[in-house]
Image (cartoon, coloured by chain):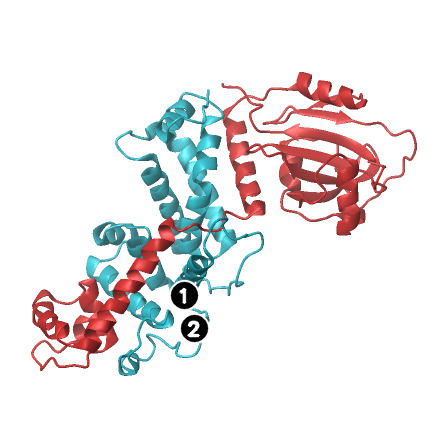
Amino acid sequence: MTAAASTDAELIAAHAAGDPRAFAELVRRHRDRMWAVALRTLRDPEEAADALQEAFISAFRAASSFRAESQVTTWLHRIVVNACLDRIRRRQARPTVPLPETGPGEPAAAGDAMADRETRLVVADALAALPEEQRVPIVLVDVEGYSVADTARLLGIAEGTVKSRCARGRAKLAKVLGHLRNPSADANVPDGAVDTSHATRSREGR
Amino acid sequence: MTGIDSVPADGPMEPPWPVDVLADLHAGALDTAVARQLWPLVRQDPDARSTLAALDTTRAELAALATSPAPPMPAHLATRLDAALAAEAGARMAPVLDLARARKKRNQRGWVAGVLVAAAAAAVAVVTIPRGTGTSTDAVGTPVTSLNSATLTAALGRSDYGPLADPGRRAACLAANQQDPNQTPAGAMQVTLAGKPGVLLVLTTGKLAQYRVLVVGPDCATGHPDRLAEAVIGGGTVPTR
């Protein structure tokens, strides 16, 4: 049965063999981390929850096809990212909805130093304010650690496009986060690329 | 606009460079030949170096997001996810009853009643508590004949508390039923059960994908549980195929 000490790979194997508890344990272990991935990618909590549900159900059904040479976390992560990107493709024509500053039921992580937490919130907030075409490549490359080549394949765009979208997004973030201190450099950011000199917490529509 | 467009490949490349050009250089988005020319110049310019450092800092902060503690999935969304996975598990597995445990528990409390068996999915045991008086039917509530995973799913995420809309009254009712008065139910809807009006509450049990479904009458209050039915649904009560 499902021992708490089982490895992820053992849980997958147990699930594939019919153990009804194994997958639940796997979800329990990874849900919050995958939730963070989905929320960063999609911004909207409802959408992120739906994507996560689709992803976990896909994983539930596909577990027998899991191959032990890949890490379970890598495998799950990829399924979650795919589910998120699917939703982005499907909703592309829809306008964005402004998000509340913090959602309900999101207590601060325990044991988190206040300064770190505030930095994380500010960075996460600034990231969420980027237009989607910049936010998603940055989430994949800079946060989740996918290579530019992998990101290009996931998004179906050229590697050069991934790089330049990341570059644009990072330039905005560096400014919003107060890392760019040179006013003349600020002035050189072209119109339309950023408009945040006094509105660091504004959210952009697309 | 691409980064490559913003740098004249054959023009003089002198500071100050636009932030976007430096960001492109930093990201490897510039044409290789342009980048090769630009890097030595940029390295000699303090402002450009400070911009590149700002971009490095930004990337480091982004990378830290992946490992820093993040807020957990909100409880109401996690509950929905668990329910969906329980339904998926229910579709995969045949139902089973955990009657002995439920019966024992109820008997200890002195309530004995009929046990309804839900034929569908991951449904489990239901204990109804007959009430001696009152047969009035309130049309407000959704008619419910048994508590099963379909009932559970119908109520999840809803906040239709009816007579228990007041948080204080709800807390008192939960306490009267030996439940944590401070919890927010994962779902609530007004129902009629066997002709009696009530409020169906979905409570988490602390076990993944397992819920306590509690149906109470409108008079539920401190010292008066007014319980119409209760069931534990899902969470390890399904066997292998």
Q: Residue B62 lies in what quarter of the image?
A: bottom left
Q: CA distance from mark 2 to mark 1?
A: 8 Å
- Are both tags, 2 and 1, on one chain? yes
Label the red chain with its letter.
B
Q: Nearer the viewer, residue B154 or B234?
A: B234
Q: Which chain is cyan?
A: A
Q: Percent x, y for residue B130?
A: 85, 27
Circle 2 residue? A200
| Mark 2 chain | A
Which amino acid lies under the numbered mark 2 shown in the image of this protein? Answer: Thr
Q: Which residue is mark 1?
A: A126
Number of residues whose C-alpha sits closer than 10 Å to that of mark 1, classed few (under 14), some (14–19) or many (20 or more)? many
Q: Is residue B207 above or below residue B160?
A: above
Image x and y of residue A15, in percent: 42, 25
Residue B165 visible at all: no
Q: Is residue B100 left or right of residue A85?
A: right
Quadrant including the N terminus of chain B: bottom left
Query: Residue A19 appears at what percent x and percent y?
Result: 46, 22
Q: Position of residue B187 (x, y in %)?
A: 66, 43
Quadrant assignment, res A88:
bottom left
